[in-house]
Image: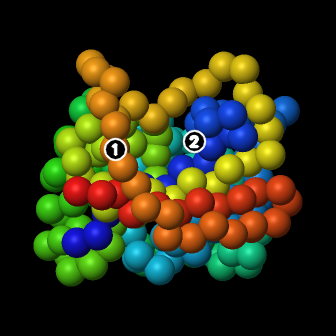
Amino acid sequence: MKAILWATLTANGNYAQSSPENPPKQEALNDFAAHAKAAGNFIVGRRTFEAMQDPNRVPQEEEANTDGPFAGMDIVVISSSIHDIPGVTVVRSPQEALNYLRQKGHQTALISGGADVHNTFLSQGLVDEVIFNVAPVLEGKGLNLLIDQNNYGYMHVQLLDCKPLGGGVVQLRYAIDR
């Protein structure tokens, strides 16, 4: 199974932190919905899942769907504190999330956040590709990707694609060399 990590970053490389004053770019939200639909699933942490329940984060093109933009998808939430969330599968670890999706017959797993989940997948060598949507904003304080939290390791990648999504958002897609 191919594991793809999807994230929105600021132009200076931090995770884009959304707030009412700085909402997520609609182009990035639409892109996430398209990738989730293509994969048929996505993996998130509990806090990110809770933030996704905000109706302002639903992609515009999907709002007409009364079942929501993620109806029929396998949504996997990684949490050590919550044991049950109606309509989603709760697991304890990244490997358990991938095993669940593999057993369900998925060929691709979309890892969509947050920073702790991304860093854990990367540090455990479970990611095949990364998709970074770079938002046109600089942020003074933010979270970063950490591939090796104890050392200054390197992870070599190969550029697969680079394209504008609109609204100043640029998407970079890389394969991770193993």
Residue 149, x across and y down, in percent: 31, 23
Q: Is residue 37 left or right of residue 54?
A: left
- Mark 2 or mark 1: whose residue is earlier in sequence: 2
Task: Give the CA distance from mark 2 to mark 1.
Answer: 30 Å
> Quick one: quadrant of the N terminus?
bottom left
Residue nearer the viewer, 122 or 94: 122
Q: Which residue is mark 1?
A: 155
Residue type at mark 2: give it.
Ala
Q: Nearer the viewer, residue 91 or 14?
A: 14
- Give the vertical position of 24 relative to 152 (above or below): below
Classify residue 97 as left or right of residue 119: left
Q: Which mark is residue 51?
A: 2
The residue that appears at 21% across and 42% down in the rendered structure is: 124
Q: Residue at x 27, y 19 (%)?
A: 150
Q: Quadrant of residue 157?
A: bottom left
Question: Where in the figure is residue 75, as x and y percent of width and height?
Answer: 38, 62
Residue 109 visible: yes
Residue 120 shows in this picture: no
Q: Pointer 2: residues within 10 angstroms few (<14), some, or many (20+)?
A: few
Instruction: Tell me the element at label 2.
Output: helix
Kind of residue sitting beneath label 1: Met
Examine the image and state in which quarter residue 128 appears. Answer: bottom left
The residue at the point 49 percent across, 70 percent down is 160
